Amino acid sequence: MFSCASIVGVLASAAPAPAQTGAPALALIRDAVASEITNDQREALIPPSGQTFLWVTAKASGAAQTIDLTRVALTGNDASFPLVGVDSAWDGDPKQFSMIGRARTKDGKTKDPLEETRSDGSVAFAYTPGKLAELKILRPPASVCLLFAVPVGFKTGQIAGLGTNALVLPPLTTP
């Protein structure tokens, strides 16, 4: 007869190791701020008042991996900013973001994020509101674009949740 503790021990030893270990899963390619972005429904979205969008293009190389996007956050200016969108379909170009956070259209309407699953063969993205937000790097190398809403004037920070070490952003320059 098995005890609950022994069953849990067997299940835990059979579970796969977490995919987010070691150095950052992604390496910085470029980053920039934007006053407007486009979502997957091709709607122009604007950040909350007093904020701007910051997008970060990063490249995954090495082994396939899964990233829990609910754990990804940008820290800087003594604050933390959650991930609000991902562009996984354009090899890191910030063209159309799959939103995982609420956003506003230019006319002030609030848009809730939509459930979405997509795969382009090298990257897969899945989002179910309140349940799941994950990015799978299926066949590296692959690039993606991460989207945050930060205060206007934000200069530098680091992205946590991509591995055991944070991805450090260089200071942003104003165009």
Image: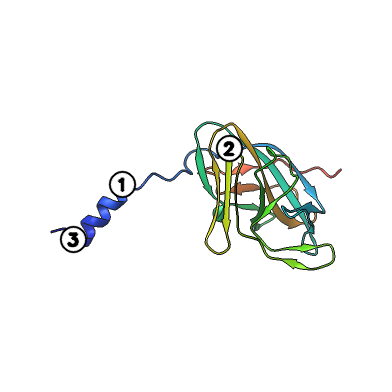
**For the residue carrying disc 2, how many other residues have a C-alpha within 10 Å: few (<14), some (14-19), or many (20+)?**
few
User: In the rendered image, which residue does mark 1 sit on?
Assistant: 14
Disc 2/disc 3 C-alpha distance (Å) = 43 Å
Amino acid found under the numbered disc labelled 2: Gly
User: Does 53 sit above or below residue 93?
Assistant: below
User: In the rendered image, which residue does mark 2 sit on?
Assistant: 121
**Residue at (58, 40) in percent of width and height:** 123
Mark whose residue sits in front, 2 or 3: 2
Return the residue nearer the eye: 16 or 89.
89
User: In the rendered image, which residue does mark 3 sit on?
Assistant: 3
Mark whose residue sits in front, 2 or 1: 2
**Residue at (56, 56) in percent of width and height:** 70
- Could you tell me which secondary element the residue under label 3 belongs to? loop
Of callouts 2 and 1, which one flags the residue occurring earlier in the amino acid sequence?
A: 1
**For the residue carrying disc 3, how many other residues have a C-alpha within 10 Å: few (<14), some (14-19), or many (20+)?**
few
Q: Report x, y in % for residue 107.
A: 85, 66
